[in-house]
Image (cartoon, helix red, strand yellow):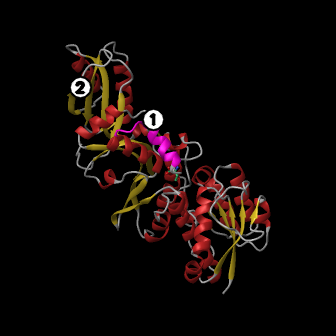
Amino acid sequence: MRKINIGLLGCGTVGTGVAKILLENKDLISSRAGAELNLKYVADLDPGRDRGIKFGEGVFTGDAFKVVDDPETDIILEMIGGEKIAKDLILRAIKNGKQVVTANKALLASCGNEIFGAAAAKGVDVAYEASVGGCMPIIKTLRESLAGNHVRSMTGILNGTCNYILSKITDDGTTFESALSEAQAKGFAEADPTLDIEGHDTAHKLAILNAIAYGMEINLKDIYIEGISKITPLDIEFAKQFEYRIKLLAISKKRGDSVEARVHPTMIPCKNLLSNVNGSLNAVTISGDAVGDILLYGLGAGMMPTASAVISDTVDLARNILSGSVGRIPLLSFRMAGIRKIPVMPVDEISTHYYFRFAALDRPGVLSKISGILGNYGISLKSVHQKGRKTNGSVPIVMLSHLCKEADVKKALDEISRLDVVGTRPALIRIEDDDQED
Ligand code: HSE
């Protein structure tokens, strides 16, 4: 049986899981791949850490460049993360004609056009299933299973840390801080958890999905991003009363010749399947013109689920090497010549439904002042609620809107914020509700 040499760069959480699967399931993987996948190198700067793995003599090295420069290495698994070194190593591996697997969503979201361009020019594969949604086969689904579809929209929970935090606050009344600490202890969170909490990790993943769904260049900078740090237990409580749950969603919709792409906390009906995706689980609904709606669901973070996706890519690449079919599936799902610059709509141009919460003085006429301003901007209200008790002299007034334009909402809220009867800046949470007609 042919031996295919693997060089693993980075042996942190995911890298350790990858090494474990490669070593423990070696026979199974060989019989599926049709080749012996030999873990020839593991490069990491911390050789002393106990990973619960016994590597053979000469496997562990501190020199990742030696691994990508070794003519005997066939497939490079980049599990270092971050942008600088990882990018240098991937580009060097491509230059050396290696096949590459990466889980590095931040790098692909910011430098993917360059990396995929280099790989296409060299005629090598760069596989990246683990970069989005952990073990969920979302890249394979978009690149292969839905090849006959115009993708119309994608709606996903793509960050395990945020989903864990929101689930814990909603279901167990845990504080934000302790839910975040738990997510960190479980190994879901990024080294810098603000990437999770402020929505950037979700946006990285959405930028990658948009490219392969719509045949567009990867465009991170135009995605609207808002994280979960401003969500309060009060908003979560109101959401429950309206039979919604709050989720950090990645939302992408094809709108003619442009794409709507946004990441923000969203109220969705409790009966929506995504409402029931809790803890560190991820899920994404994809709507295609032929297929209708499909839903992928699975663990989006953590050592073994993410490693499972890396191994899937590694087996694919090994099969391609064996059959001489490297490059069979276009890197970004579309042939390079078919990839276009499709504009992402500015968030001000989107129309959706909104939840507003105002902290207002409990005085006659306050409600009519607020709703009057909303009305002046064409914002029609579906319902108005004043519930709860005074805190710091004000009461929460909650309004749910019909469909309206983001730009109008912003102008109205700016004006309302200036009213002397309204306290802090109003809270705004967008609502995705298929049942709402207007
Ligand atoms: N920090 C990420 C998450 C890891 O919480 O989902 C997986 O990309």
Give the answer, above or below, for where 51 lies relative to 329.
Answer: above
46 relative to 184 in the view: left or right:
right
Give the answer, above or below, for where 419 lies relative to 52.
Answer: above
Magenta-colored segment: predominant secondary structure: helix
Question: Is disc 2 in contact with disc 1, using a CB cutoff of under 8 Å?
Answer: no
x%, y% of residue 22? 61, 71
Disc 2 within 8 angstroms of ligand 1 (CB): no
Q: Quadrant of the N terminus?
A: bottom right
Q: Neighbour class for label 1 at 10 Å: few (<14), some, many (≥20)?
A: few
Q: How far is the residue under mark 2 from the one under mark 1?
A: 23 Å
* Residue at x-position 70% and y-position 60%: 90
Question: Where residue 388 is drawn, which disc sits there?
Answer: 2
327 relative to 350 in the view: left or right:
right
Q: Quadrant of residue 178?
A: top left
Q: Is residue 182 magenta?
A: yes
x%, y% of residue 55? 70, 68
Give amino acid for label 2: Gly
Q: Quadrant of the C terminus?
A: top left
Q: Neighbour class for label 2 at 10 Å: few (<14), some, many (≥20)?
A: few
Q: Secondary structure at mark 2?
A: loop
Q: Secondary structure at mark 1?
A: loop
Give amino acid for label 1: Ser
What range is drawn magenta here?
Answer: 173-185
| Residue lying at the far bottom of the rendered structure | 1
Q: Quadrant of residue 320?
A: bottom right
**Would you say residue 278 is visible in this rendering?**
yes
Question: Where residue 229 is drawn, which disc sits there?
Answer: 1
**Would you say residue 203 is visible in this rendering?**
no
57 relative to 275 in the view: left or right:
right
